[in-house]
């Protein structure tokens, strides 16, 4: 039966056809250099051009994970080259899991303020959601056995480079394609870096 299922799976065609998103060098460099619109960058055209050429090469060669190392003894294939950043995220999650399963310490509560408002951006006033979450956190922490981790999602609007990149639902195609932690990001040649989830995974 298992052999029959494998043969059936192999017979299913891979569905493609959404079209290529590859950019020409001209369009790529136009988008890359747009971040240097500030006249302060006018003093460094040669440096910007040099960086643009380096980034274009990484994009053209699709260097998603430019720094790798051998997986090590924890993996079925210890010689497999894996992204250093992914291995570091995995180690942080393992450390958090050990702490969570430890009998030491009390219970932890994760509070999330999901409002995009912050007093550092329009409309320049603190969100009521934030105020309520802070008050709830203080109430919880007044109980000796509890501690609070506070996640303020307004930082996605207020902090430079702070973002959460979207899940692409790899698991909906095939379970083995989904990794924990997510291996879709960072993707350096596409500029998909600074994924805050790498810091948030241990809170889960």
Image (spheres, rainbow, N blue to C red):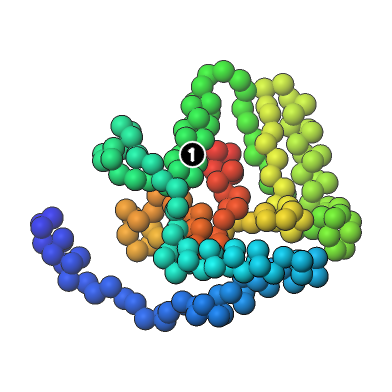
Residue 169 place in picture, x, y as percent: 44, 61
Q: Quadrant of the N terminus?
A: bottom left
The residue lying at 43 percent from left, 79 percent from top is 20
In the image, is 186 to the left or to the right of 20? right
Q: Quadrant of residue 8?
A: bottom left
Circle 1 — which element? helix
Q: Position of residue 98 (x, y in %)?
A: 48, 27
Q: Is residue 167 visible?
A: no
Q: Is residue 185 above or below residue 141?
A: below
Work out which residue is located at the far front of the displayed protein and give it. 46
Q: Residue at x 75, y 36 (%)?
A: 137
> Of 94 and 61, which appears nearest the observer?
61
Rendered residue at 61%/27% (across/down): 107
Front residue of this view, candidates 166 and 204: 166
The residue depicted at 89 percent of the width and 56 percent of the height is 125
Crowd rating for badge 1 (residues with CA inside 10 Å; few <14, some 14–19, many 20+): few
Left or right of residue 154, residue 107 in this image: left
Q: Position of residue 155 (x, y in %)?
A: 73, 52
The reply to whether residue 144 is in sight is yes
Q: Is residue 74 left or right of residue 1?
A: right
Residue annotated with mark 1: 88
The residue positioned farthest toward the top in the image shown: 104
| Residue 97 as seen in the image, left or right of residue 36 | left
Task: Count up the numbered dots.
Answer: 1
Q: Is residue 45 above or below residue 90?
A: below
x, y percent for residue 97: 49, 31
């Amino acid at each position: 039966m298992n052999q029959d299922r494998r043969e059936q799976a192999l017979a299913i065609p891979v569905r493609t056809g959404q079209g290529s998103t590859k950019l020409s060098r001209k369009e790529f460099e136009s988008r890359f250099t747009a971040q240097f619109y500030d006249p302060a960058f006018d003093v460094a055209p040669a440096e910007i051009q040099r960086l643009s050429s380096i980034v274009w090469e990484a994009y053209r060669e699709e260097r998603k994970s430019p720094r790798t190392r051998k997986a090590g003894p924890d993996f079925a294939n210890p010689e497999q080259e894996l992204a250093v950043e992914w291995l570091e995220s995995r180690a942080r999650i393992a450390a958090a899991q050990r702490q969570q399963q430890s009998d030491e310490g009390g219970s932890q509560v994760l509070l999330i303020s999901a409002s995009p408002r912050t007093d550092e951006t329009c409309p320049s006033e603190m969100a009521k959601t934030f105020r309520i979450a802070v008050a709830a956190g203080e109430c919880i922490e007044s109980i000796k056995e509890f501690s609070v981790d506070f996640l303020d999602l307004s930082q996605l609007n207020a902090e430079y480079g702070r973002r959460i990149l979207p899940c692409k639902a790899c698991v909906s195609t095939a379970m083995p394609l989904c990794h924990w932690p997510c291996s879709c990001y960072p993707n350096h040649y596409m500029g998909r870096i600074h994924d805050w989830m790498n810091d948030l995974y241990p809170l889960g």
